[in-house]
Image: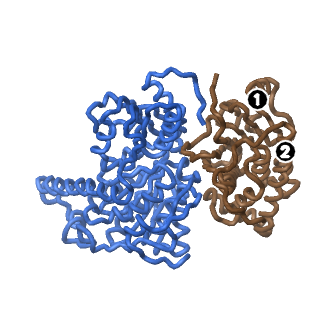
Chain colours: A brown, B blue
């Protein structure tokens, strides 16, 4: 039996495919958690950056300083960005949920059921809840592009875990698109393509925020229906209120 | 770009106000370069790389650097750095894994040519088989060439070590290149907290005449020994010249230690000096060790951390003193050869107490649980498998 002390930290593992923005998502998640007043670390781990190849990124959020680095071997949360992670085994770990901790949550970007009854049996035995969430569909509906899938995934994470609120999420997203940081060298060219598509950067941010907000609210509702309480104690370093969008 | 004012080295490194930022390791290295009054950066964007030189290129575009260019390949980049530094410029470059080895012939000649450059080493796997993850075996290739080698644990160390290295490398009694190493991905691509000095302050410019050897004077060494190699005189002359010259290089290397004390708070950091069992580590493994020591202490175990910041010069005296009563010394590493464990064994009287585990390689993550297993084993504790964090 694996023993497990009281939760002081959320370890988040994000199996995705190259090009889906899981690395950007990790940075935004950690930045938003930092704005909220938690300790946070982001850690991308994407191998040879190829589109559609397995890519994974990680974020750690906690109430005390975090030294731990690298891949998350024992996640509290797994966010599956693409169905190929499950259906084609495009994952660093097999099964993709290996190492998931008791009382964890698995969020899958899908509009159909991908897990088998035996998966559910295993996961239910350690009280892990699964949320099938159509993030790409929501991104297309609201932002008009599947490129905003990662924004929906960020929203759904914080809605389900209830640790970071919408103002901090908005700060995280804005700090990315206002060029306070870049996720990778290739991101600059991706940005210019995105900008052409959306015409204006501000419009892009607004659409991304709306996508994240919608996903956040839907996931919050799901969490309440499933009796999930906030997954971490309150943030230890609450900052002044971030500026509203 | 803000107008930058020159401040005294000691003020910038030791006293200037600091502001906390949440940035990647690559950004931390570039932010240090921004404050270091660097004249020129030269790079070759080989794969694998980090964003560091890309970000330093941005600094040039903003006006922080006088010149920046892409070399023809790594050997050319490292040779050009030597030329720029000998010409009187303050120079920076960074590389990784295979790129480092391609440039190594030129890099290994820097100490003998008395080139005070700063080299960022963002470790990746050395082939083969090919992998591009943060194995740090490449640091072992740097340990015997005479350069100073520092190993940064996190983004804060990357900023502090890089900025201080520009000052230390140009000290007249040191005057050697410094490698600031850290793990790729785990530090370079990950965001962490960094307390940084104001961006409108920078180090004084390099004074190339404040040097133990004159710059660009072809009639006396070091330029003379390139133009007019001693081996052309006689074997006997070349032995003698090489001998005295390398003795001076290594003495200079040892003299870097006093500046490591002054600017980096010493070559080691110790938590719980009276510990029964120590976890001794450098770089990213020190972060994992720090986490393990925290959990061991929460369980009431008498475990301590010895973090080694300076790999060359190696803090022999300090390591011996710290470990003198240790029953066991666990050395976790991100490489297969265990270069740190070997170095520690060579420097303490009872090398049998060194446990060269856990080791991960190929760039694999080093889970804290693996270090805990070694701690339990060293203390004779039998335990069920535990998930810690």
Q: Is residue A209 above or below residue B302?
A: below
Residue A52 is situated, as x and y percent measured from the top left of the image, at 71, 45
Residue at image mark 1: A127
Quarter of the view holding residue B339: top left
Q: Quadrant of residue A36?
A: bottom right
Q: Is residue B116 left or right of residue A126?
A: left
Quadrant the N terminus of chain B occupies: bottom right
Give the x, y percent position of residue A144.
85, 58
Mark nearest the camera among 2 and 1 is 1
The answer to whether residue B349 of the structure is visible from this angle is yes
Compare residues B218 and B270 and report the one nearer the observer: B270
User: Is B119 displayed left or right of A240 in the figure?
Assistant: left
Tag 2 and tag 1 share a subunit: yes
Q: Chain of mark 1?
A: A
Q: Which residue is mark 2?
A: A134
* Residue A216 in picture, x, y percent from top left: 81, 50
């Amino acid at each position: 039996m694996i023993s497990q002390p009281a939760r002081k930290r959320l370890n988040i593992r994000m199996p995705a495919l190259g090009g889906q923005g899981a690395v950007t998502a990790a940075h935004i998640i950690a930045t938003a958690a930092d704005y909220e007043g938690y300790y946070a670390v982001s850690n991308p781990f994407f191998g040879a950056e190829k589109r559609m190849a397995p890519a994974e990124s990680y974020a750690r959020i906690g109430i005390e300083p975090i030294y731990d680095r690298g891949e998350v071997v024992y996640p509290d949360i797994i966010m599956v960005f693409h169905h190929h992670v499950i259906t084609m085994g495009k994952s660093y770990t097999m099964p993709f949920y290996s190492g998931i901790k008791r009382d964890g949550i698995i969020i899958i970007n899908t509009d159909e059921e991908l897990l088998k009854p035996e998966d559910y049996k295993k996961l239910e035995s350690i009280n892990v809840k699964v949320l099938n969430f159509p993030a790409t569909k929501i991104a297309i509906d609201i932002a008009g592009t599947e490129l905003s899938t990662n924004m929906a995934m960020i929203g759904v994470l914080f809605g389900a875990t209830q640790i970071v609120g919408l103002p901090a999420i908005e700060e995280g997203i804005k700090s990315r698109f206002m060029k306070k940081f870049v996720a990778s060298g290739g991101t600059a060219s991706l940005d210019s393509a995105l900008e052409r598509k959306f015409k204006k950067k501000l419009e892009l941010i607004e659409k991304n925020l709306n996508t994240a907000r919608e996903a956040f609210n839907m996931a919050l509702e799901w969490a309440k229906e499933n009796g999930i309480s906030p997954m971490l104690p309150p943030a230890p370093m609450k900052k002044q209120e971030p500026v509203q969008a | 770009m803000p107008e930058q004012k020159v401040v005294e080295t000691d003020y910038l490194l030791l006293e200037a106000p600091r502001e906390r930022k949440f940035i990647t390791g690559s950004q931390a290295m570039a932010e240090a370069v921004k404050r270091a009054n660097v004249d020129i950066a030269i790079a070759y964007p080989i794969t694998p790389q980090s964003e560091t030189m890309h970000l330093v290129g941005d600094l040039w575009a903003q006006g922080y650097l006088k010149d920046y260019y892409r070399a023809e390949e790594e050997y050319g980049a490292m040779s050009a750095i030597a030329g720029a530094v000998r010409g009187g410029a303050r120079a920076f470059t960074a590389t990784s894994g295979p790129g480092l080895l391609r440039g190594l012939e030129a890099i290994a000649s820097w100490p003998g040519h008395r080139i005070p450059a700063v080299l960022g080493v963002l470790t990746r796997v050395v082939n083969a088989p090919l992998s591009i993850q943060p194995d740090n075996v490449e640091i072992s290739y740097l340990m015997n060439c005479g350069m100073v080698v520092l190993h940064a644990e996190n983004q804060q160390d990357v900023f502090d070590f890089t900025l201080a290295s520009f000052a230390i490398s140009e000290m007249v009694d040191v005057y050697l290149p410094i490698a600031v190493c850290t793990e790729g991905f785990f530090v370079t691509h990950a965001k962490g907290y960094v307390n940084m000095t104001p961006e409108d302050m920078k180090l004084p410019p390099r004074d190339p005449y404040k040097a133990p050897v004159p710059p660009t004077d072809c009639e006396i060494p070091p330029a003379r020994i390139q133009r007019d190699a001693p081996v052309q005189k006689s074997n006997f002359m070349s032995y003698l010249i090489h001998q005295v010259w390398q003795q001076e290089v290594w003495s200079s290397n040892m003299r870097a230690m006093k500046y490591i004390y002054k600017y980096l708070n010493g070559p080691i950091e110790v938590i719980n000096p009276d510990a029964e069992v120590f976890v001794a580590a450098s770089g990213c493994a020190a972060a994992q060790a720090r986490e393990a020591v925290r959990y061991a202490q929460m369980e009431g175990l008498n475990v301590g951390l010895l973090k080694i910041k300076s790999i060359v010069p190696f803090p022999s005296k300090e390591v011996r003193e710290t470990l003198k009563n240790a029953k066991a010394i666990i050395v976790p590493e991100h490489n297969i050869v265990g270069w740190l464990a070997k170095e520690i064994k060579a420097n303490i009287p009872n090398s049998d107490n060194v446990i060269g585990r856990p080791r991960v390689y190929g760039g694999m993550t080093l889970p804290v649980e693996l270090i805990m297993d070694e701690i339990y084993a060293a203390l004779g504790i039998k335990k069920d498998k535990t998930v810690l964090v």
